[in-house]
Image: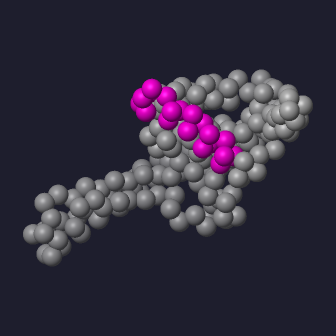
């Protein structure tokens, strides 16, 4: 029995104590196991705190991976994208945005680097575009004869898509940047 458990664990755990060879179903199982283990703690809040601590440690591990050989950086990055980045949504949305950013930096240094440079150049223009759009939408809403008497308050929220989020969308949909139509967005909250 001990020989079968050691042989099965050697196919999942690498020499550095990292998970290896995970398909989507196995990665989902590992995430569910982590969440289940944390939920069984004395209090759910402590489970979220433990997950936040584990995610913080993963960020540190990714930062320290910059000193590792390229293959080891990539292994840490893949494990992080498969297991830890999806878990970060359980502690308040994008609480750990650097997880995906560091992973894409290690896995796709040239193409992700080009996208980061483009976003850096576009950011100042994006702010102007978003402010202009907000003003135009706000003016139109304030002068709408059907909306004004029906609504007490209107709030506008604008954002520029996160670089890692844009890159992930490009990878998943196999689209170039010019085919992403939600890099900038404005939401009207009534």
Residue 43 image offset from top left, x and y in percent: 42, 29
Report the predominant secondary structure element of the magenta stretch.
Answer: helix
Q: Is 19 in front, or is 33?
A: 33
Is residue 90 on the magenta stretch? no
Q: In which quarter of the image is the N terminus?
A: top right
**Quadrant hosting residue 188:** bottom left
Is residue 41 on the magenta stretch? yes
**On the rendered structure, is 128 left or right of 83?**
left
In the depicted structure, whether residue 88 falls above or below residue 57: below
> From this viewpoint, is residue 171 visible?
yes
Residue at the extreme front of the image, as rendered? 1
Q: Quadrant of the C terminus?
A: bottom left
**On the rendered structure, is 65 left or right of 133?**
right
> From this viewpoint, is residue 121 visible?
no
**Quadrant hosting residue 97:** top right
Residue at horizontal 61%, vertical 64%? 178
In the depicted structure, whether residue 140 falls above or below residue 112: below
In the depicted structure, whether residue 184 falls above or below residue 83: below
**On the rendered structure, is 169 left or right of 151?**
right
Where are the magenta residues, as a range?
27-46
Residue at horizontal 15%, vertical 65%? 151
Residue at horizontal 50%, vertical 47%? 123
Residue at horizontal 61%, vertical 58%? 169
Residue 179 image offset from top left, x and y in percent: 61, 67
């Amino acid at each position: 029995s001990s020989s079968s458990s050691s042989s099965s664990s050697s196919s999942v755990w690498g020499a550095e104590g990292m998970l290896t060879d995970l398909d989507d179903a196995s990665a989902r199982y590992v995430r569910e196991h982590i969440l289940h283990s944390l939920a069984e703690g004395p209090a759910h809040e402590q489970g979220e705190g433990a997950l936040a601590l584990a995610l913080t440690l993963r960020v540190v591990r990714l930062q320290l991976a910059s000193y590792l050989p390229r293959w080891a950086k990539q292994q840490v990055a893949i494990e992080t994208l498969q297991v830890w980045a999806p878990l970060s949504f359980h502690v308040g949305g994008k609480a750990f945005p650097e997880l995906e950013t560091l992973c894409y930096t290690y896995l796709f240094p040239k193409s992700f680097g080009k996208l980061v440079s483009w976003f850096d150049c576009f950011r100042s223009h994006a702010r102007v575009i978003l402010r202009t759009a907000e003003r135009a939408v706000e003016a139109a809403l304030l002068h709408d004869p059907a909306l004004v008497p029906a609504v007490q308050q209107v709030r506008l929220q604008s954002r520029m898509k996160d670089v890692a989020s844009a890159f992930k969308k490009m990878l998943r949909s196999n689209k170039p940047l010019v085919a992403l139509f939600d890099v900038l967005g404005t939401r009207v909250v009534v």
